[in-house]
Image: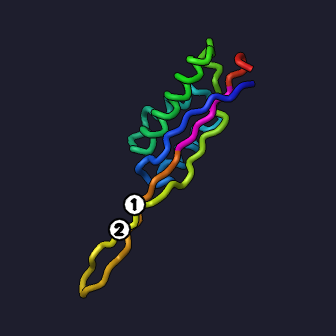
């Protein structure tokens, strides 16, 4: 079996907001995963859906004939870098903000390619 990968690096969202959807679709077929993510109203689901669509397009580009046989072997969301910002508070104090990034990785298994 051959693995086809796609990723979105430096996505401007916290990884914990996307990991929930990555766990949800892992192990499904690609068409089932896309169908599940399509009806989720969250921005993290949109980002993961776009990466999954890219992986399916990569599989078609490599010669996968049947899109229904592609299974999501791996859906992983890693921590990226963060912007550190200072937020002024009352009485001269300051709080620190971390604007987080994440890396979204999707790998599909295509049985007919390998």
Q: Nearer the viewer, residue 109 or 103?
A: 103
Residues at badges 2 and 1 in contact (C-beta under 8 Å)?
A: yes
Query: Could you tell whether 111 is left or right of 104 in the image?
Result: right
For label 2, the SS is strand
Picture residue at 50% right of the left edge, 53% below the top: 15
Where is residue 8? Give x, y as percent. 49, 40
* The quarter of the displayed image where residue 90 is located: bottom left
Residue 75 picture location, percent across and down? 60, 40
Q: Residue at x 32, y 79 (%)?
A: 94
Magenta part of the protein: which range? 104-109
Q: How many marks?
A: 2
Predominant SS of the magenta segment: strand
Q: CA distance from mark 2 to mark 1?
A: 8 Å
Residues packed near mark 1 inside 10 Å, few (<14), some (14 to 19) or many (20 plus): few
Q: Residues within 10 Å of mark 2 (few under 14, many from 20)?
A: few
Q: Position of residue 62 (x, y in %)?
A: 61, 18
- Left or right relative to 63: residue 7: left
User: Relative to 35, is 76 above or below?
Assistant: below
Q: Which residue is mark 2?
A: 85
Instruction: List the residue tagged with mark 1.
Output: 99
The front one of 95 and 71 is 95
Residue found at the far top of this picture: 65
- Colour mapping used in the image: rainbow
Residue placed most toward the observer, 103 or 37 = 103
Q: Earlier in the sequence, mark 2 or mark 1?
A: 2
Which residue is the extreme one toward the bottom?
Answer: 91
Q: Residue at x 50, y 34 (%)?
A: 51
Position of 78 relative to 70 (above/below): below
């Amino acid at each position: 079996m051959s693995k086809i990968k796609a990723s979105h690096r430096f996505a401007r969202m916290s990884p914990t907001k996307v990991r929930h959807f990555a766990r949800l679709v892992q192990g499904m077929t690609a068409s089932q995963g896309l169908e599940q993510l399509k009806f989720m109203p969250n921005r993290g689901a949109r980002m993961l859906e776009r990466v999954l669509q890219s992986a399916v397009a990569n599989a078609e580009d490599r010669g996968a004939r049947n899109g229904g046989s592609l299974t999501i072997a791996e859906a992983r969301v890693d921590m990226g870098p963060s912007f550190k910002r200072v937020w002024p508070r009352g009485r001269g104090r300051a709080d620190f903000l971390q604007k987080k990034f994440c890396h979204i990785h999707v790998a599909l298994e295509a049985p007919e390619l390998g």
